[in-house]
């Protein structure tokens, strides 16, 4: 597997993080780490082709961004819409792939999409949320630890707890609207 496309995905995500830094405020370093760990975990599972590197970077940046941009815990639809707009709209190349990576990333079962990046993205996010306790296929826990050494997870779990509490307040009858079965 070549590292150049994976590096490109990191670059795309970094450019979006810098461009939108004000939206994230003091949580920017925490979200930045999560975005980059997800990209790295995708790269451990499947080849990131040159023609999908930008899509991975855009999806990684936007996958949870609706929490900040739209101030909602029901963030998958607005996150996907923002990512597709960033690519140039619904007809843009890779728009369907990016939307699928975002809308499927909290599915409890296997992602419903043919491109292996979508399932790899789902597993990567789950691995990071679970602090590496649930690992991605083909990777060792030491791989996850190496990613957290490069992209620290400090503050990520408390951020998740605060966001979940906000979600319960936002809609007590549907406290986890992003989960799919």
Image (cartoon, rainbow, N blue to C red):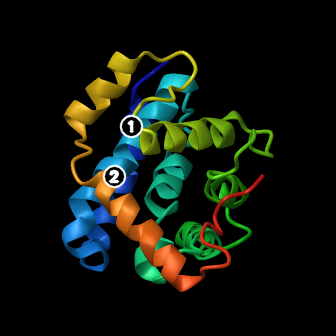
Measuring from the top left, give residue 67's x and y in whole percent: 46, 74
Q: Residue at x 19, y 70 (%)?
A: 26
Q: Quadrant of residue 122?
A: top right
Left or right placement of residue 48 versus residue 161 in this view: right
Q: Residue at x 70, y 55 (%)?
A: 100
Measuring from the top left, give residue 36's x and y in whole percent: 35, 44
Q: Quadrant of residue 113?
A: top right
Q: Quadrant of residue 87?
A: bottom right
- Please tell me which of labels 1 and 2 falls first in the chain: 1
Dot 2 falls on a residue whose secondary structure is helix
Distance of label 1 from label 2 (alpha carbons): 8 Å
Residue 55 visible? The answer is yes
Left or right placement of residue 8 versus residue 146 in this view: right
Measuring from the top left, give residue 49's x and y in whole percent: 57, 33
Measured along the vertical axis of the image, is residue 164 above or below residue 132? below
Q: Would you name the residue on which mark 1 appears?
A: 131
Left or right placement of residue 117 versus residue 130 in this view: right
Measured along the vertical axis of the image, is residue 155 above or below residue 109? below
Q: Would you name the residue on which mark 2 appears?
A: 157
Measuring from the top left, give residue 18's x and y in whole percent: 26, 66
Q: Which mark is residue 174?
A: none
CB within 8 Å, label 1 to label 2:
yes
């Amino acid at each position: 597997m070549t590292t150049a496309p994976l590096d490109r995905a990191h670059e795309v995500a970094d450019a979006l993080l810098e461009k939108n830094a004000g939206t994230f405020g003091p949580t920017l370093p925490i979200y930045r780490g999560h975005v980059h760990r997800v990209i790295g975990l995708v790269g451990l599972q499947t080849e990131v082709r040159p023609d999908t590197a930008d899509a991975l970077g855009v999806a990684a940046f936007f996958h949870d961004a609706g929490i900040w941009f739209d101030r909602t815990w029901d963030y998958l639809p607005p996150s996907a819409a923002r990512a597709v707009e960033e690519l140039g709209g619904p007809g843009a190349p890779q728009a369907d792939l990016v939307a699928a990576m975002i809308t499927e990333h909290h599915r409890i079962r296997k992602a419903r999409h043919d491109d292996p990046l979508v399932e790899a993205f789902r597993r990567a996010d789950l691995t990071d949320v679970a602090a590496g306790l649930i690992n991605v296929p083909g990777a060792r826990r030491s791989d996850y630890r190496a990613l957290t050494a490069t992209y620290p997870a400090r503050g990520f779990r408390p951020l998740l707890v605060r966001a979940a509490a906000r979600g319960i307040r936002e809609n007590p009858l549907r406290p986890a609207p992003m989960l799919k079965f």
